Image (cartoon, grey):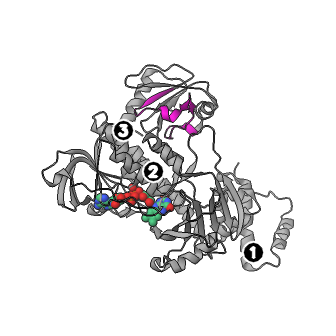
Amino acid sequence: MAHAYAPFPYVAPPGLNAPEPRHKVVIIGAGPVGLVLALDLARRGTPSVLLEAGDAVATGSRAMGWSRRSLEIFDRLGIADKVLEKGVPWSVGRVCHGDDEIFSFDLAEDPGDRMPPFLNLQQYHVEHFLTDRALADPLIDLRFRNRVTGIDPDADGVQVTIRTPDGSYMLAADYAIACDGARSTVRAMLDLDFEGELFEERFLIADVEMEGDLPSERWFWFEPGFHDGQSALLHRQADNIYRIDLQLGPHADPKDESRPERVIPRIEQVIGPDFDLDWVSVYSFQCRRLGEFVHGRVIFAGDSAHLIPPFGARGANGGLQDADNLGWKLAAVLDGRAPPSLIDSYNRERVQAADENIRQSSRATRFMGPANGVERLFRDQILALARKAPFARDWVNSGRLSTPCIYATTGPDDPRLPAISRPGAVAPDAPQGAGWLLAALGRDAMLLAINCDAPAVADLPVLPVEVNPAVVARYLGRAGRALYLVRPDQVIAARWVEADARQIAKALAALWEGRA
Amino acid sequence: MSLIDTPNIDDPDDFLAELLAAHRGLTEAQSHALNAQLLLILANHVGDPAVLRAALALARQR
Ligand SMILES: Cc1cc2nc3c(=O)[nH]c(=O)nc-3n(C[C@H](O)[C@H](O)[C@H](O)COP(=O)(O)OP(=O)(O)OC[C@H]3O[C@@H](n4cnc5c(N)ncnc54)[C@H](O)[C@@H]3O)c2cc1C
């Protein structure tokens, strides 16, 4: 069944009649990033006004590959069960060259993880779950058909002008978070421009509905017979809807390419004639970001801050990690628990992450569309080698799948402990009692005590961690015991084999100050 | 390990003959392809990024 896009109701905002009291946070744009940020803030007790120009979820599947980290974030926001029930988890990817499969890979699930490595689900479903949740939350004031048309920041706040079907009004807030997407009006109004390499690539993307029962695998083709010289990608999504991406190259004419007379024959060559075309779009993408994500009291997150080619699903997943990184910092600064400098660490860490995502995605884009000459020579010979030598399969780049960035930090570390859980990394999951370790972490900073008693430190709850094989592999390594200081966004701040209260208190202070 | 840039093959004449024999009958494009594959295979065999970087630098040196 094609998706029905029922509008969400517009309600005339109070600000049309009388000035509203000053708000703490105004979030501009209720795409996945704005919604996740509002829900995360609400969990931390921070209210927000969420302004959305439109009144419906995204059209078409758009970002449909959700990483394990995104699923973990959804879990904290209370929608993971719905996402897992509706979505299509996968771990096997097949890579073809011409019409032959040259190799396959398996992201194999590990019993140490609650969440699958990747799950496909149309963006509109995810937005629906998030929106329903936001509408039910008394700390989120979600306003549809409220378009921001003006923004006026000063040293300690922001004035926002908003247009509604009933006229315009203004709001004042301590912080405005621009989650208004790739064509961000806030970015334009503040006269900010993107930096970075400006290359454009175009893909034709389509959602097709069919009854067949193709396996839940990712299929990638380099230069398939059905699409000469270009790349193609096939994913299974929810509701018998499959997603097909066909590379067009930078010079294609988007209008002409998306005509059904042109699209349908191409898709028929991939999956046969029995399908309905549900949605088709030409997606042009670039590889660029804002120089800084924090501009005083205006903060950018998601596509408004960075444009990332979709290979590896680093765009939307990276955007959710922006929100995850920002939520606790903003809440702590607004509560007076942390100095405003904590927000600067959002800029530092998420710029690092965006650069990594851009680097990875632009390499993948290059591999798919190599320049003529030596770049194409090596690309083609890597593909040829991958058929006969296992090593070359690692060199084939059809997108390096999104994993959380490991933030640069000088937080205390011990070389006896495993690399996977080093400071700056997201705490890996592990079974804990009848449940899971990540689910047992609270919304505050926490000290994990593994095989030892934790020294008492003020304002730092302790979680004794069950020792099981996953915990040994991921948290202990060659040590018999360990202490881990975990931030409110589940990122590891510091770790020790042995530490006294003073050392831990020092690391905790650095955590709240956002020191690297 | 650092890059070996002193003699390391017992009989370089033999190897050169084998290398050229491998190219015999190939078009120029096919020869380029063979060279590219050879380079990738040997780079993987070497593995050590410092050695590979030194080799790149030596090759670029005029
Ligand atoms: C055709 C298409 C295909 C895509 N395919 C992929 C893919 O395969 N993989 C992938 O990872 N990503 C893909 N993306 C990108 C992905 O959809 C985005 O990364 C993701 O939606 C970013 O989320 P966001 O919340 O930052 O922005 P958006 O989802 O763009 O949300 C921004 C929101 O802000 C609202 N808004 C804008 N201006 C204002 C304003 N002035 N006032 C109030 N509200 C405003 C908009 O209405 C919108 O709801 C695709 C995007 C498109 C357009």
Q: In the rendered view, does A474 fall on the left or right side of B38?
A: left
Image: A216 above or below A98: above
User: Dot 2, how many residues are within 10 Å of its Cα: few (below 14), some (14-19), or many (20+)?
Assistant: some
Residue A43 is labelled as 3
Q: Amino acid at mark 3?
A: Arg
Label 1 crowd (10 A; few <14 / some 14-19 / many >=20): some
Q: Secondary structure at mark 2?
A: helix
Mark 3 vs mark 2: in front: 3
Identify residue for label 1.
B31
- How far is mark 1 from mark 3, CA to CA? 62 Å
A431 w.r.t. A68: above or below: above
Q: Residues within 10 Å of mark 3 (few under 14, many from 20)?
A: some
Q: Position of residue A64 (x, y in %)?
A: 50, 57
Q: Residue at x 83, y 64 (%)?
A: B12
**Badge 1 amino acid:** Ser
Q: Given the image, what chain letter belongs to the residue carrying mark 2?
A: A
From the viewer's perspective, tell me whether residue A349 is left or right of residue A469: left
Tag 3 secondary structure: helix
Start-end of magenta stretch: A420-448
Q: In the figure, is residue A109 to the left or right of A80?
A: right
- The vertical placement of A346 against A307, above or below, is above
Q: Are marks 3 and 2 in contact (CB under 8 Å)?
A: no
**In whole angstroms, how far apart are the C-alphas of marks 2 and 1?**
41 Å
Q: Chain ID for label 1?
A: B
Q: Gap between marks 3 and 2, in whole Å?
A: 26 Å
Cβ at disc 2 under 8 Å from ligand 1: no
Dot 3 and dot 2 within a common chain: yes
**Residue position marked by numbered label 2 in the rendering:** A352
